[in-house]
Image (tube, helix red, strand yellow):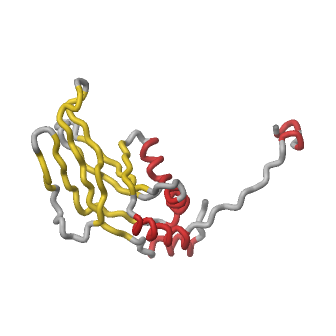
Amino acid sequence: MTLNAPAQQQRLNSTPPTIRVAVLIERQRQPNAWEDWRFRITEVILDDGGFGSQVRTLRDDGQTAIFLHPGLPLSLYSDEGEGYYLNLSSGSPVWFVMWRTADADPSRAWPEFVTLSYNEAGRLLDAQERVDNVSLPAELCQWLQAYTDEHYRPEPKKRRRPVSFQPPDQR
């Protein structure tokens, strides 16, 4: 899709709605004979700045640890409308969290990116990134729904001609 000059300028000048979130990651030591460490995203919560800016260990009993990663930005973009719509229409909307582990220290993991777009999460998965999802709270579903209603218009469905009505060279 090509944007005309005024539309491109408007996108460059407009600031997308952005919130800050904190991600909780659980780490388990040797959950089975084949893994030294297992990580999972346990929760994504709104971050009003009260968590600070540094990663914090909330609990570590030697077997299971929970880490808080504050200050991750989440922005909504009008060209991701279809991805937001697909997330909302799934029946149980979610946060999508892309996270990584350290090669030098496999006991460390951290979130890199948080999105609400189903399409964006799919692109990350296609790029072989780790993406987990966590349920989205109802009040944020309403916020996302309002943004999607304002910025997304599904393309009208085009009727396809049955193959029997198409010329032989176009079948």
Q: Quadrant of the C terminus?
A: top right
Residue 148 falls left or right of residue 112:
right
Residue 23 spot, x, y in % from top left: 27, 56
Q: Quadrant of the N terminus?
A: bottom right
Quadrant of the rendered image containing residue 70? bottom left
Q: Please give the name of the residue rendered at 24% of the width and 53% of the height, measured from the top-left corner.
A: 24
Q: Is residue 35 above or below residue 152?
A: above
Q: Please give the name of the residue rendered at 10% of the width and 43% of the height, measured from the top-left corner.
A: 61
Q: Is residue 97 above or below residue 130?
A: below
Residue 95 spot, x, y in % from top left: 39, 56
Residue 86 spot, x, y in % from top left: 54, 56
Q: Nearer the viewer, residue 148 or 7?
A: 148
Residue 85 spot, x, y in % from top left: 54, 60
Q: Please give the name of the residue rendered at 24% of the width and 49% of the height, measured from the top-left corner.
A: 25
Q: Report the residue that reaches farthest toward the top.
A: 33
Q: How many marks?
A: 0
Q: Is residue 47 above or below residue 108?
A: below
